Amino acid sequence: MVMLEPDGRIERRLRDAGFTLVAGVDETGRGALAGPLVTCAVILPQDAELPGLRDSKLLTPLARARLAVEIQKQAVAISIVRVPSTSIDRRGLHRSNLRALREAAMRLRPTPEYLLVDGYPIRRVPFPCLSIKKGDRVSIAVAAASVVAKVTRDRLMVNLNRRYPGYAFAENKGYGTREHWRALDTLGPSPHHRLSFTGVGQMRLWSSGDEEFSEEEADALVGES
């Protein structure tokens, strides 16, 4: 039976085996029709105290936001990678996802000694790596990465909603709700929609170019309370 709340057991076993810096990496936004794919990698200290930490999808927005602040305070290292819709269209979703997971892990300083990944095995990293099904319900490091990734992406989508209010990005976060599909049918895709996704690219295209958040903007959004 899969646990709903990670207990840190796997991290303790790895530390007992000599791996002090254990990182977790996770993503959010894979299935969205619009907006970026966001990955996050986190190294937590052995004495991290994050009551209520669990898979970000099982938390309320307020609980996620509070936990994200605590994770940032306590983490040894955090790395965030954002992949815009244009890159997803160019490279493909799965390839973009693996590349972003790897990049988030590789950017961590200090460098992790062991990496735990939610679901997808990552190759070509200079440290041992273990993929875990439902990793955000087993590993506290993966769960922490899941929370920070989700909070970061949600805030980016709220910002996009201010630029393109017709799609209700603040509510649907880019996912394919009935209202979102209706807006696509009426307005056509925005510059941040994934045109390679079935049904999206066939809609009427906007003529404006792609707009991307800078890393500084993303960092500022993560730091908001």
Image (cartoon, rainbow, N blue to C red):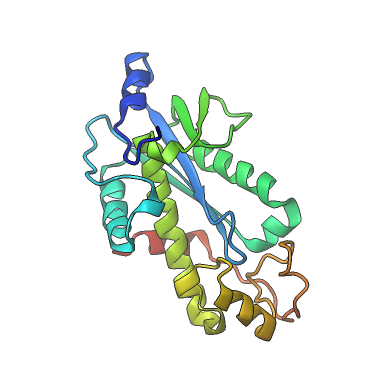
Farthest-out residue, front? 1
Q: How many marks?
A: 0
Question: Is residue 18 found left or right of 105 in the rendered image?
Answer: left
Is 19 drawn above or below residue 188 in the view shown? above
Q: Give the residue displayed 28% in from the left and 64% down from the top.
A: 225
123 and 189: which is toward the camera: 189
Quadrant for the N terminus, please: top left
Image quadrant assignment for residue 110: top left
Can residue 88 be seen in this snapshot? Answer: yes
Question: Is residue 113 found left or right of 207 in the rendered image?
Answer: left
131 and 137: which is toward the camera: 137
Can residue 108 be seen in this snapshot? Answer: no
Q: Give the residue displayed 75% in from the left and 76% down from the top.
A: 203
Q: Give the residue displayed 24% in from the left and 36% down from the top.
A: 48
Q: Position of residue 143 (x, y in %)?
A: 38, 42
Question: Is residue 107 found left or right of 78 in the rendered image?
Answer: right
Question: Is residue 188 found left or right of 65 in the rendered image?
Answer: right
Q: Position of residue 20 (x, y in %)?
A: 35, 23
Is 178 drawn above or below residue 21 in the view shown? below
Q: Position of residue 5 (x, y in %)?
A: 31, 40
152 and 64: which is toward the camera: 64
Farthest-out residue, right? 202
Is 73 drawn above or below residue 17 in the view shown? below
Q: Position of residue 38 (x, y in %)?
A: 52, 54
Q: Give the residue displayed 72% in from the left and 51% down from the top.
A: 92
